[in-house]
Amino acid sequence: MKSLYGVIGYPIEHSKSPMMHNAWFRNENFEGYYHPFKIEKNQLGNAIRGMKALQMKGWNVTIPYKEAIIPFLDEVDAAAVAIGAVNTVVYKNGKWVGTNTDGDGFVASLSLKRTKEQLKTSSILLIGAGGAAKGIYYALVNAGVNNIHIANRTVERASSLISKIAADGNFKGISLDSATEQLTQYDIIINTTSVGMYPEIDSVPIEVTNIKAGTLAVDIIYNPLETAFLKAAKERGAETLNGVGMFVYQGALAFEHWTGIRPDIEKAMTMIELNQG
Ligand code: ATR
């Protein structure tokens, strides 16, 4: 009998996770099935009780339940506690355990462009200080990066993120204007905001006039595959990486938590890019 997995959220219709995980189950000959569950806000508790009663082995959690799910779990691991959000639930030793693979998934996706050693010595600019930035910042610090600036429209939010996730080294919250002026000093520039996401495809989170050639510009957005930010950076000689990598790697890490199997990354990336939109 197939074990049941899935994703809970609202809305959930456009999630690419079911397609990706079901393809992995098939490719790995693993007896699993992954279903999208659209849960109304006032039904979250009932839904989780139902999912436990159905003996699901795990599930992903997306907007708007990444924080709200925490009280329903038996344990939450260190990454999820630090980030304050859960994107993956795993049934382990009779307990429902929450973890968060978004940040580690993002860092893993950087391996498509940079080695771990290159990453550690890179000077990084994170744009944005919301939930997505928090997971990515936490994972970058854990990966040993010790030079990170966070630029945000609301600078206090960036500074507060830095002070919450304590770290030695060169970590600083700055304004978008300062970041724009000193853009040449960064080796990797990452947009974690939703600026540039469909349908606002012409907006950029930061002007890249001062970007230096060879810099890696990364966007966590994957609709469109090439945001206005990535396009402008590329025109100035930067390398680019879109959000498909992060999406696939965060899913792969969840898949590995559930099954112990590392799924095929490349095939999944091609499938997501072809089915984008
Ligand atoms: P998420 O969980 O997806 O990161 P969030 O917590 O709402 O979402 O954070 C959104 C991020 O995008 C924030 O950094 C936000 O800046 P503020 O903290 O100043 O609000 C940033 N953001 C959203 N819209 C923006 C815009 N039009 N210009 C600049 N920054 C924007």
Image (cartoon, rainbow, N blue to C red):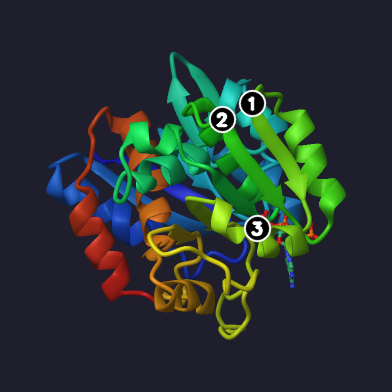
Which of the two marks, 3 or 1, is nearer to us in this view?
3
Q: Residue furthest top?
A: 93
> In the rendered image of this protein, does residue 164 appear above or below residue 200?
above
> In the rendered image of this protein, does residue 271 appear above or below residue 21?
below
Q: Few, some or many C-alpha atoms within 10 Å of disc 3 (few <14, some 14-19, many ≥20)? A: few
Q: Residue at x 65, y 38 (%)?
A: 85
Q: Which mark is residue 169?
A: 1
Q: Is residue 56 visible?
A: no
Q: Amino acid at mark 2?
A: Asn
Q: Residue at x 79, y 61 (%)?
A: 153
| Picture quarter with ligand 1 | bottom right
Q: Residue at x 55, y 80 (%)?
A: 198
Q: Which mark is residue 146?
A: 2
Q: Are marks 2 and 3 in contact (CB under 8 Å)?
A: no
Q: Few, some or many C-alpha atoms within 10 Å of disc 1 (few <14, some 14-19, many ≥20)? A: few
Q: Which residue is mark 3?
A: 182
Relative horizontal placement of residue 180, taking residue 42 as reference (left or right): left
Which image quadrant for residue 70? top right
Q: Earlier in the sequence, mark 2 or mark 1?
A: 2
Return the residue nearer the eye: 37 or 107. Answer: 107
Location of the N terminus by quadrant is top left
Relative horizontal placement of residue 109, taking residue 208 as reference (left or right): left
Q: Position of residue 273 (x, y in %)?
A: 30, 70
Which image quadrant for residue 105? top left
Q: Earlier in the sequence, mark 3 or mark 1?
A: 1
Q: Residue at x 53, y 64 (%)?
A: 12
- Spatial CA distance of label 3 from label 1 is 19 Å
